[in-house]
Image (spheres, rainbow, N blue to C red):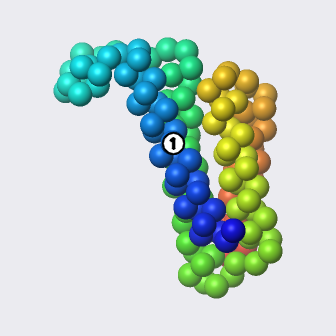
Amino acid sequence: MTETTILAAYGLLVMLTILLQVLGGVQQLSLGYLISSRDEGRSMTGMTARVKRALDNSVVALALFAPAILLLELLDRTNATSLLAAQVFLLARIIYLPVYALGVPAIRTLAWLAGFAATAILYFLAL
């Protein structure tokens, strides 16, 4: 895998998270509500709400990770360290989603920290 294929893989993970959130929303809120204008506010609970929060966080992580990878590619500064950082990021995010959905806070926080630190390393490599 290269850094850009890891970016693509993470994009697919975010898309999977969207699908899980939508499926949970259909179950809790009904398809009729989801295809409506949603003027009436409703909220999700339990695992579905946690998947929504994980999705929100995943989109922020993607917004930070993607520019770092693209910048390294543009500057032709990818190397073994950037590949390892990207791999750590992806693995951390793969762990993050199910532990957040299942409500495991300590491991979730450690996975988030690992992904965040890996992203920071990518930016330092671009300097």
Q: Quadrant of residue 69?
A: bottom right
Is residue 56 visible to the viewer in this orientation of the structure?
Answer: no
| Rendered residue at 76%/78% (across/down) | 79
Q: Measured along the vertical axis of the image, is residue 104 above or below residue 97? A: above
Q: Measured along the vertical axis of the image, is residue 86 above or below residue 22? A: below
On the picture, is 105 further left or further right than 67?
Answer: right
Indicate the position of residue 8 as horizontal and vertical percent values: 55, 61
Label 1: which residue?
16
| Rendered residue at 57%/74% (across/down) | 71
Indicate the position of residue 56 as horizontal and vertical percent values: 50, 38
**What amino acid is at disc 1?**
Leu
On the picture, is 10 further left or further right than 120?
Answer: left
Is residue 30 visible to the viewer in this orientation of the structure?
Answer: yes
| Rendered residue at 24%/20% (across/down) | 32
The image shows a total of numbered marks equal to 1
Indicate the position of residue 19 as horizontal and vertical percent values: 45, 37
Q: Quadrant of residue 34?
A: top left
| Rendered residue at 70%/30% (across/down) | 99
On the picture, is 106 further left or further right than 123?
Answer: right
